[in-house]
Image (cartoon, grey):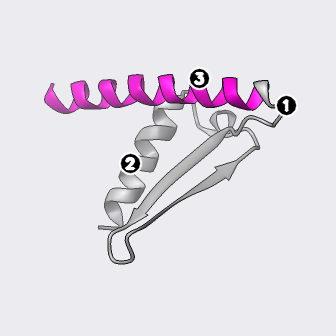
Amino acid sequence: MGEEKVNFDRMQALTKDIKEIASLCQENDRPVPTEIRLFYNVQTQKAGANYQYDPVVAKTKNGISEDVVNGWIEEERSKL
C-alpha cells in the first residue's frame, strides 16, 4: 500500500503542475505539450526536458494517463 500512496501523491503533484503549465501556454498563445519528460544527469549535474505535442494517452492500451506515468517511471528505473 505504501508504493500506491507514493504513486498517488506523485500523480496529484504532476496533475497540478500540468494544469499550471497548460494555463501558462494558453495565456501566451503557445501550444500545450502533451508530454513533458524531465531528467537530471547526476554526472554532468545538468537538467533538461523533452517535450511532445502529439497525443500520447490515446496510444496506450486503455488510454489512462496513469499508465503513461507509471511506464515512464519504470523506463527510467531500468536505466539505473
| In this view, 50 is above or below 44 | above
Determine the residue positioned at 56% across, 29% down: 18
Q: Nearer the viewer, mark 2 or mark 3?
A: 3
Write down the residue under mark 1.
29
| In this view, 52 is above or below 11 | below
- The N terminus appears in which quarter of the rendering? top left
Q: From the viewer's perspective, tell me whether residue 33 is left or right of residue 48.
A: right
Determine the residue positioned at 68% across, 33% down: 58
The numbered mark, 2 or 3, whose residue comes first in the sequence reads 3
Q: How far from the left and from the top, in percent, is residue 71?
A: 44, 46
Write down the residue under mark 3.
19
Determine the residue positioned at 32% across, 58% down: 77
Q: How far from the left and from the top, in percent, is residue 21?
A: 62, 31
Determine the residue positioned at 69% across, 28% down: 24
| In this view, 36 is above or below 79 | above
Q: What's the CA distance linking mark 3 and mark 1?
A: 15 Å
Picture quadrant where residue 27 is located? top right
Depth check, front residue: 54 or 14: 14
Q: Over which residues does the magenta segment extend?
A: 1-26
Kind of residue at disc 2: Ile
Main secondary structure type of the part rendered in magenta:
helix
Picture quadrant where residue 32 is located? top right
The numbered mark, 1 or 2, whose residue comes first in the sequence reads 1
Q: How many C-alpha atoms fall within 10 Å of the one at disc 3: few (<14), some, or many (≥20)?
A: few
Residue 73 numbered tag: 2
The numbered mark, 3 or 1, whose residue comes first in the sequence reads 3
